[in-house]
Amino acid sequence: MDRKEFLSQIGLGSAGMFLFSCLGGCSKTAGGNVAQAPSNVNLTVDITSSAYSALQTNGGYVYVNGIIIAKTTTGNYLAVSQACTHQGATVVFESNSSMFYCPSHGSMFNANGSVANGPASAPLKQYTVTANGNVLTITG
């Protein structure tokens, strides 16, 4: 094998590997790396604790063990998985619309976790929130 043929072979191999990695990065789940939603959840959160004080204010939200817990502008509590189902980025709560938003790629999720706007195609897992005074119980 001469030098020209050797360099040609190396170039084709490198191009193939580059193309494969690019196409893999374009998949909806980035190679299956999207975080799984927590299951068998049974959390209690005392909103008077400084760690959860954002939940005392309408529109506030906190992250607890892979879950985003939010208080709507009308005073209701919501809880869904915090990892976007598109590529696993952490979603935030948009209080003005009571929706969850992924700042990485723009996916929007309704209050119940259903997809309102992609690129995400799967919903966020929704959890049940029960309020008893200053204590919230999140299950699901």
Image: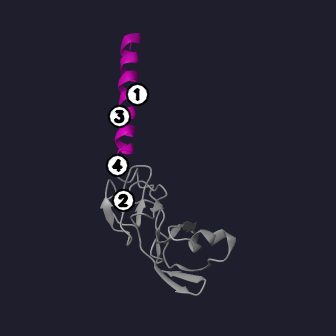
Res 108 label: 2
Which type of secondary structure does the marked residue at label 4 adopt? loop
Label 2 close to label 3 by CB (< 8 Å): no
Classify 39 as above or below 5: below
Amino acid type of disc 4?
Ser
Image: magenta residue range:
1-26
Res 19 label: 3
Which x, y percent locates residue 3? 41, 11
Closer to the eye: label 1 or 3: 3
Which x, y percent locates residue 139? 50, 81
The residue at which mark 1 appears reads as 14
Kindly report the secondary structure that dominates the magenta region of the rendered protein.
helix
Which type of secondary structure does the marked residue at label 2 adopt? strand
Q: Does 29 lie within the magenta span?
A: no
Q: Which residue is drawn at 40% across and 22% down?
A: 10
- Counting labels gives 4
Which type of secondary structure does the marked residue at label 3 adopt? helix
Which type of secondary structure does the marked residue at label 1 adopt? helix
Closer to the eye: label 4 or 3: 4
Amino acid type of disc 3?
Leu
Task: Give neighbour class at mark 4: few <14, some 14-19, many 20+ (Cα, 10 Å).
Answer: few
Label 4 close to label 2 by CB (< 8 Å): no
Amino acid type of disc 2?
Met
Of 103 and 134, nearer the camera is: 134
Q: Answer with left or right where residue 23 lies relative to residue 130.
A: left
